[in-house]
Amino acid sequence: MSEERRDGLLVVRCQLGEREAFHELVRLWHGPLWRYVRGMVGSPHVADDLAQEAWVSVVRGLPRLREPERFAPWLFTIARRTVADHVRQMHRTPQTTEVGTDDIAAADGLGDVLTALEIEAGLSGLPPLEREVLILFHLEDLPLAACAEVVGVPPGTVKSRLHRARRMLRDVLVERGYEA
């Protein structure tokens, strides 16, 4: 059974009032949710609080979820909003770097696939927009279309951010002594 189908069945069971189904959803998705939030905010303690806030929002919104098989993108969208609210409360504005279209079209030169540990090691050196697409795509294994849905931009924009993020990550990792 595919993950989407499994999640969809669990969501329907939750909507029918089965508490055990919700516990199963939390068991399956709390780790990925927490890793995403921690990657975005950097602090495990803040990630604990924000993940809990996201689960409260899930509980409130689950009865209205019309497409149960789309649970994963919906969950990460909630987490994204929770992080954004936190960032607004901290009076910080997200920063990203400006990159020309010629740079985006250039090869990123990563060569080999990076391991999750290498990605996590370099995440702190990336701006929030680039960090987010790397987390969703590489660490949470969401497909490109689902990443676009979570971030709220077209898939082409996600591709551009992902390309830019890989290049920036390579630079950060080289600077820190990792082989890229």
Image (spheres, grey):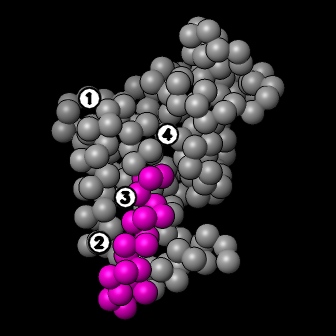
- Mark in front: 1 vs 3: 3
The answer to whether any part of residue 59 appears in the image is yes
Mark closer to the chain start, 4 or 2: 2
- Please determine whether, in this image, residue 93 is positioned above or below residue 27: above
Query: Could you tell me the amino acid type at mark 2?
Result: Val
Which structural element holds mark 1?
Answer: loop
Q: Is residue 94 rendered to the left or right of residue 167?
A: left
The residue lying toward the viewer, choosing from 111 and 48, is: 48
Q: Single out the residue that lies furthest toward the bottom.
A: 16
Kindly indicate whether the residue at mark 2 contacts the one at mark 1 (C-beta within 8 angstroms): no
Residue tagged 2: 59
> Is 53 left, or right, of 110 in this rendering?
left
* Mark 2 Cα-neighbour bin, 10 Å: few <14, some 14–19, many ≥20: few
- The residue that disc 4 covers is 132
The local secondary structure at tag 4 comes to helix
Q: Which mark is residue 92?
A: 1
Q: Is residue 32 rendered magenta in the image?
A: yes
CA distance separating discs 1 and 2: 28 Å
Quarter where residue 26 is shown: bottom left
Quarter placement of the C terminus: top right
At label 1, the amino acid type is Arg
Amino acid at pointer 4:
Glu
Q: Which residue is mark 3?
A: 78
Please state the horizontal and vertical placement of residue 3, each as a whole percent of the image.
Answer: 61, 70
User: On residue 21, which mark appears?
Assistant: none
Determine which quarter of the picture holds residue 64. bottom left
Q: Nearer the viewer, residue 101 or 108?
A: 108
Q: Residues within 10 Å of mark 3 (few under 14, many from 20)?
A: many
Q: Position of residue 156 (x, y in %)?
A: 66, 46
How far apart in space, not on screen, are marks 1 and 3 (Cα)? 20 Å
Q: Which residues are magenta?
A: 13-33
